[in-house]
Amino acid sequence: MKLMAFDVGGTEIKYSLMDDDLNVYDSGYVDTPHDSFEHFAQVIYDIYEPHKDECEGIAMSLPGFIDVKKGRCNGGGALFYNHGTDVAPLLEEKCGYKVVLENDGKAAAKAEYYKGSLQGCKNAAVFVIGTAVGGGLIIDGKVVKGRHFTAGEFSFLSTSINDFENPYSHMGTVCSTRGLLEMYKRAKGLEEEINGRQFFALLNEDETAKKVLDEFASGIAKQIYNLYWLLDLEKVAIGGGISRQPILIEKVNEQFNHLIDDSPVKQYLPVMEVDIVAAQFGNEANQIGAFMTFVEENG
């Protein structure tokens, strides 16, 4: 089986023509439209149409509370035109082929659990760090979705009980790539935009960048610390484009170990540790998980 696999993010739509063995025959990316669903659907059609005779349908991960059975986005996520929209049926009408959706974080969790860095785990999590923070939870060997499909939506977690009403105190802003870059801009008093590649290139020479990365990694480590106590996690895989930077994984582990060393409740557990790793499939995890969902729904 070959499918067109899409990873729809707040900034880019990444795509691949992929088969059952995860071989990729064509891939690329385009900017994500933010104006209307009609524009979004046309972009998907334009990518899919040249390959329509080579594959059996469309597998898509995207942000939001996704009802896989209905192909509906019930809300949440960066693309407001998808909220309350029957995305899959409308795309099927546009493209003329079967479309199956999956939430981006849950797609990444499936890819990493079944074929990647989380194989063999009982309780684990995936953090997909991008425009916001996608998430997926594996509990007792199953990817958790929840009654309203909101399980694992890390972006909506508050990072401060003392600043709960501030929308900029939630994980989706504080712990996202966008949050990292905004922290650096504020620290340097910059007005011009900076991208992730530029930021990480500065680390060898810019002390402010080093301090900002430590603060950013500490924020992620604190959320992993909280989840450890809630779920007894064995491992956390960090995905998204930023996960290709080895220093990020190194810093998150370093900050997590500081939290453990300083924890006032450390004495209650003989061993308290979480293996924090880069997602094996990195930026491709969402597409692979979407492919798996298509197979599950049409097996």
Image (tube, grey):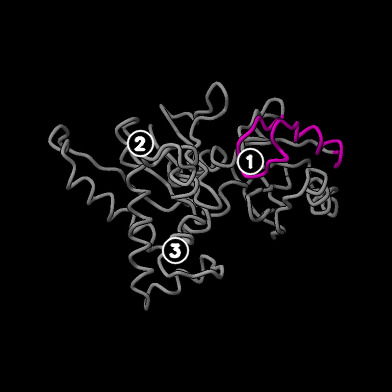
Q: Residues under labels 3 and 2: Cα distance?
A: 23 Å
Please state which amino acid type lies under the numbered disc 1. Ala
| Residue 192 vs residue 70, the one in the foreground | 192
Q: Secondary structure at mark 2?
A: helix
Q: Secondary structure at mark 1?
A: helix
Please state which amino acid type lies under the numbered disc 3. Arg
* Front: mark 3 or 1: 3
Q: Is residue 91 above or below residue 278?
A: above
Tell me the magenta residue range: 71-96
Q: State the image quarter where residue 1 is shown.
A: top right
Q: Is residue 183 above or below residue 44?
A: below
Say which residue label 3 marks: 186
Tag 3–tag 2 contact (CB < 8 Å): no
Q: Residues under labels 2 and 1: Cα distance?
A: 35 Å
Please state which amino acid type lies under the numbered disc 2. Ile
Q: Is residue 159 above or below residue 299?
A: below
Say which residue label 1 marks: 290
Q: Residue furthest bottom?
A: 205
Q: Is residue 68 left or right of residue 269?
A: right
Q: State the image quarter where residue 298 is shown.
A: top right
| Residue 96 vs residue 39, the one in the foreground | 39
Which badge, 3 or 1, comes first in the chain's sequence? Answer: 3
Tag 2–tag 1 contact (CB < 8 Å): no
Q: Is residue 215 left or right of residue 289?
A: left
Residue density around tag 3, few if under 14, some if 14–19, many if 20 or more, within 10 Å = few
Say which residue label 2 marks: 161
What residue sits 80% from the left and 50% below the top? 48
